[in-house]
Amino acid sequence: TVVYMGDGGFFSAYGLDAHTGKQKWSLNERSGLLVPGEKHVYLSSRGIVAVNAADGSVVWRHLPPPPGYAGLMWYYSGKVYTESEILDASTGQRVRLFDSTVRSFAAGQGMVFVADIGGKLTALDAESLEQIWQMQTPAQSKPFVPEGLAVAGRHVFGVFYDGYADTAHSGELDAYLAGSGKLLWKVPFSCKRRALFFHPIGADPQNVYLYEPAEREGS
């Protein structure tokens, strides 16, 4: 068993023996994000770098489309997902290009759910990547920005907030049927600052969990 780590976004990545902590390999590669797959470890550098999990050798490199990656990478079922495209995890070949920047992914019920900054929530078949359904999520004067998705049983839950507000923020926690995208319920929220961010959501068959940082003194 190998444990993988980067050095805080600088210029090295490491593989360590999980039982002893002994270094098995190191790679001189900027590693802003590090995501393990089944056989490879994926680093977000100037593009995506796939590394052999056993010995640290580079398997493939992929340069992103302009303007590049901003810091989202996710692995699921043989594919690497970024905010702009989906790659075959074995070869690095692009298999789908998104038409809008993606902010969150989740998977369940044989599907991958994708929420983008245009306010769209899309369900894709996890294997073929064919679109099953797509819907526009809640909007006021401008679309809400997705900040987290979670799947539990037959339901998909999403946090969406008014990312265009300069001060106070408002948003919604929504529940959808995974198979159809039907909106089941929604709960509005508001906060003094952007407090719900970067996948702050979890779910089980009975509950949905959110994280909201406490206000600092003077904020």
Image (spheres, rainbow, N blue to C red):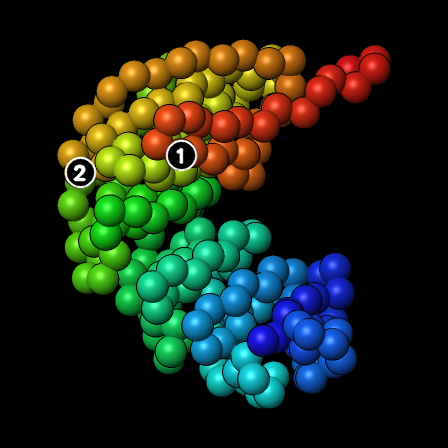
Q: Quadrant of the C terminus?
A: top right
Q: Which residue is mark 1?
A: 204
Q: Which residue is mark 2?
A: 179
Which element carries disc 2, helix, strand or loop?
A: loop
Q: Is residue 121 visible?
A: no
Q: Nearer the viewer, residue 177 or 166?
A: 177
Q: Position of residue 41 (x, y in %)?
A: 53, 72
Q: Is residue 155 left or right of residue 87?
A: left
Q: Is residue 65 left or right of residue 217?
A: left
Amino acid type at image mark 2? Gly
In the figure, residue 1 lies in which quadrant?
A: bottom right
In the figure, residue 34 lies in which quadrant?
A: bottom right
* Residue pictured at 53% horizontal, 83% vertical: 52
- Can you say whether 168 is above or below 117 in the image? above
Q: Position of residue 31 (x, y in %)?
A: 65, 66
In whole angstroms, how far apart are the C-alphas of marks 1 and 2? 17 Å
Q: Is residue 104 visible?
A: yes
* Residue pictured at 35% horizontal, 39% vertical: 151
